[in-house]
Amino acid sequence: MVEKRFAVLLCAEDSEYVKKKYGGYYGVFVKMLGEEGEKWDVYRVALGQFPDDDEIGGYSGFVITGSCSDAHADELWICRLIDLLKKLDIMKKKVLGICFGHQILGRALGGKTGRAGSGWDIGFRTVHLSSSSSSNFFSTLKLPARLSIIECHRDEVRELPPKAEIIGWSEKTGIEMFKYGDHMMGIQGHPEYTTDILLHLIDRLLLKDLIIESFAKEVRAKVQECEADREAWRRLCVAFLKGGLW
């Protein structure tokens, strides 16, 4: 049997805490998505590490992670990532974009991203899944109409790429999920996050003065009362990357 290969396109720098406890965000994703008989590689694209053109064809799928950077920025690595995603689209490679990955995927395909008008979204959010006929894979996977997910972002996809379809929305974010063809999907929230990771990120954002203490305290209190549907999100992401949902 041919070994399936997948790649994590790491768009953030791991904190020492996440590296020590989870093996970095690469480790977090492999724990959620990896299965026996697969090989998972990591490319630290935020540091300029990209797969060569002759390597891309050997992968069955790619995962784009979150980031502290803005998907609407024009840093060199972000522009290189956009070029790579356009190539993957032409090759019809499976690509799953998470948070920043969701936004940069939307931008690469012709959509628009930017600051969310409603400000930061940190904590737990209920995502309403589409009931359209083209998204009936949700019922195929026996998923409920609403799923709880961890969010940590202040940017969003403002305008869908042409020919893309919204497949999830929330009261705060209109484009929580989108699909593009049968091979690309974006999720604004973090199906891979644990509550522990979220609490760690709240502390980091506070230290960087990106949020204020009163807001951090409020979010921490709410976080203790909620739980994400992590297993349902895992099944959805695995089925998209490795199965034929559409």
Image (cartoon, helix red, strand yellow):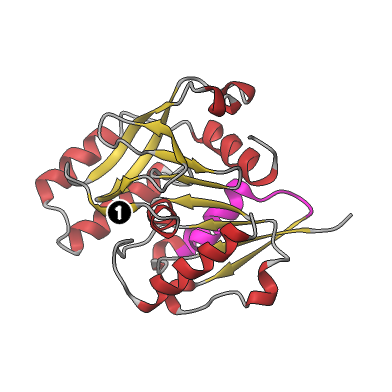
Q: Determine if the magenta segment contains residue 20.
A: yes
Position of 67 relative to 123 (above/below)? below
- Between 200 and 78, the one nearer to me in the picture: 78
Is most of the magenta stretch helix, strand or loop?
A: helix
Question: Residue 231, percent across and down?
Answer: 55, 33
Position of 54 relative to 62 (above/below)? below
211 to the left or right of 220: left
Q: Residue, x 42% and y 32% (percent of image)?
A: 168
- Between 78 and 107, the one nearer to me in the picture: 107
Q: Determine if the magenta segment contains residue 53.
A: no
Question: Residue 128, percent across and down?
Answer: 39, 26
Let me know if residue 197 appears in the view: yes
71 to the left or right of 108: left
125 to the left or right of 61: left
Question: Residue 138, percent across and down?
Answer: 56, 26
Rendering quarter of residue 121: top left
In the rendered image, the residue lying farthest to the front is 162
Magenta residue span: 19-37
Q: Residue, x 34% and y 43% (percent of image)?
A: 151
Let me know if residue 23 appears in the view: no
Q: Name the residue under label 1.
A: 113
Disc 1 element: strand
Question: Residue 186, percent across and down?
Answer: 46, 46
Q: Residue, x 89% and y 54% (percent of image)?
A: 1
Crowding at dot 1, Cα within 10 Å, few <14 / some 14-19 / many 20+, comes out as many
Q: Which amino acid does label 1 sit on?
A: Thr
Looking at the figure, which quarter contains the C terminus? top right
